[in-house]
Structures are given as structure tokens and as C-alpha cells.
């Protein structure tokens, strides 16, 4: 039997890269998946089509995870498709947007980074909390940047991901008595569009060479870890921030 058979999962930022890999992996393990997207409708459609081709069930739903009205619609569409219960919530949505020094930043940039990376986790988790039951699992996305401060020009990104890390620990305490687990992942250098856009090739090569495994990670490796944390196999794991970086940095 598949480890997530009969469960319902919601994945924010589920249309591409790590989010897409997670959506497909959860479906392969038997979950019905709500693929949330913001600016990649084609990616969301492709993700849903891939899941359906594998015999799974999925829908795609547009929502800006920083806006309450969009999140309310995401909840409504989830209920319409799969009922009133959600077993797995994966908060992947986030972004760096640009590398800036403090001299180059303004309040609007601060608000953008904090809203997309942290406010989104707060709003989405709060909205879906009434649908999470005993045995439910929330998985947030922090970053290695939260541990080491990030690369050049990523201070606000690192700070926002640090907030996610701390918030995860707090929610684990709050949700635990109700049988709901809350964990976070901190990916290191994963081969995705994120690094295609914001990390120079020579930096990527240097980081990979400095990693004990001598390579970047793959999105599917992150997805495998999410599927484990979402399953009953991880039933006594909560409040953890799990590093997945090939040994580049340790907890």
C-alpha cells in the first residue's frame, strides 16, 4: 500500500521546481493533491496532467499566498474538490527576487521578502488549520540561509527563512496536543530555477565542490524527504528543522 493512500495534500508553490517535484511525489504515494500556483499556470497544468497520467487525482488553484481573499478561495476550492479534511500542508511558496545590500533595500523590498516568505506561511497555515485533523502534517520551507545568513545580498531572505524556522518550532508546540506535526526543511544548493536566476555558475560550482557529496541536490531528493515527513513513518517527528544540503552545513 502507498504510504499516503487516501490523504489530501495542499502544496503552495506547487507548479515548478521543488514544489512540482513534491506535488508529483505525494501523488505517487497515493495523496490527492491541490497544486497552488501564482505566476506559472502552465507549470501547474503540467503538474496536474503528470499526476493524472500516473493515475492520481489533482487540481490546480491560483492564489497569491500573501492575500487573504486568494487563500480563502484556495480553501474553498480544496473543499469543493476533496472535502473538508486536509492531511498534509506543504508551504513551499517563497522567493529571493533580487540580491541587494542594505543600502539598496527599501521598505517595499523588506515587505515583499517578509510577506512572500513568512506572512504566506502564517496566512496559509491559519486558513487550513481547521481542516487539519489528528495525524496531520505541516511541512514548511526554511533554507540553509537561515542558518548561515545566506549569500551576498540575501540578508532579508535569510531573516525571513529564519522566521519560518522559529515559527515551525512554535507551531509544533501549539499543534502537538491535537496530534498535528509541524516540521521544516532547510535545503542547501538544489538544482532549480532559483539558483539559475540568482546564483552565478562559478559560485554554484564552488559550493558543489565544497560539499562532502561533491554535487548539488535534486528537487526529487527534497520531495522524497517531504513524503517521509508527511507519512506515518515520521509519526514521532515534530518541531524539527531538517537540513538537506549534502553535508555542507550541520545542525
Image: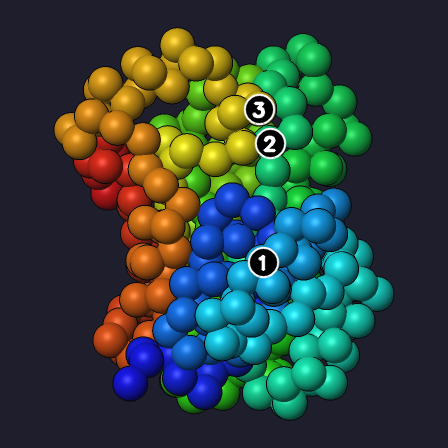
> Local crowd at mark 2 within 10 Å, few (<14), some, or many (≥20)?
many
Label 1–label 2 contact, CB within 8 A: no
Q: Locate residue 71, reporting x and y percent.
A: 75, 66
**Residue 160 to residue 223: above or below:** above
**Residue 144 to residue 176: above or below:** above
| Sequence-wise first label, 1 or 2 | 1
Q: Locate residue 216, reporting x and y percent.
A: 31, 31
> Local crowd at mark 1 within 10 Å, few (<14), some, or many (≥20)?
many
Way the structure is coloured? rainbow
Q: CA distance from mark 1 to mark 2?
A: 23 Å
> Mark 1, mark 2: which one is toward the viewer?
1
Q: Give the label on residue 47, or none.
A: 1
Q: CA distance from mark 3 to mark 1?
A: 22 Å
Label 2: which secondary element: loop
**Residue at left 75%, top 59%?**
63
Q: Give the label on residue 197, or none.
A: 3
Q: Locate residue 191, reporting x and y percent.
A: 41, 33
**Left or right of 242 on screen, residue 131:** right
Q: Residue placed farthest to the front in the image?
A: 53
Viewer can see residue 134:
yes
Q: Quadrant of residue 49?
A: bottom right
> Mark 3, mark 1: which one is toward the viewer?
1
**Residue at left 37%, top 31%?**
189
Label 3: which secondary element: helix
> Local crowd at mark 3 within 10 Å, few (<14), some, or many (≥20)?
few
Label 2–label 3 contact, CB within 8 A: no
Amino acid at each position: 500500500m502507498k504510504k499516503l493512500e487516501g490523504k489530501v495534500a495542499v502544496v503552495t508553490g506547487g507548479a515548478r521546481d521543488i514544489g512540482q517535484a513534491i506535488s508529483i511525489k505525494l501523488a505517487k504515494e497515493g495523496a490527492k493533491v491541490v497544486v497552488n500556483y501564482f505566476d506559472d499556470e502552465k507549470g501547474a497544468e503540467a503538474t496536474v496532467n503528470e499526476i493524472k497520467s500516473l493515475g492520481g487525482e489533482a487540481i490546480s488553484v491560483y492564489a497569491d499566498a500573501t492575500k487573504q481573499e486568494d487563500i480563502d478561495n484556495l480553501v474553498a476550492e480544496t473543499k469543493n474538490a476533496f472535502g473538508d479534511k486536509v492531511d498534509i500542508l506543504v508551504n513551499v511558496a517563497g522567493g529571493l527576487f533580487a540580491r541587494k545590500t542594505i543600502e539598496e533595500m527599501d521598505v517595499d523590498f523588506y515587505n515583499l521578502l517578509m510577506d512572500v516568505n513568512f506572512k504566506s506561511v502564517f496566512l496559509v497555515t491559519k486558513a487550513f488549520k481547521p481542516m487539519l485533523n489528528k495525524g496531520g502534517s505541516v511541512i514548511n520551507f526554511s533554507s540553509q540561509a537561515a542558518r548561515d545568513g545566506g549569500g551576498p545580498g540575501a540578508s532579508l531572505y535569510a531573516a525571513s527563512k529564519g522566521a519560518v524556522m522559529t515559527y515551525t518550532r512554535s507551531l509544533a508546540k501549539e499543534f502537538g496536543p491535537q496530534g498535528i506535526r509541524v516540521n521544516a526543511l532547510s535545503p542547501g544548493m538544489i538544482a532549480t530555477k532559483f539558483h539559475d536566476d540568482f546564483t552565478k555558475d562559478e559560485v554554484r560550482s564552488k559550493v558543489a565542490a565544497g560539499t562532502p557529496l561533491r554535487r548539488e541536490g535534486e528537487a526529487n531528493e527534497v520531495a522524497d524527504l517531504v513524503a517521509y515527513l508527511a507519512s506515518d513513518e515520521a509519526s514521532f517527528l515534530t518541531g524539527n528543522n531538517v537540513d538537506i544540503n549534502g553535508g555542507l552545513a550541520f545542525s
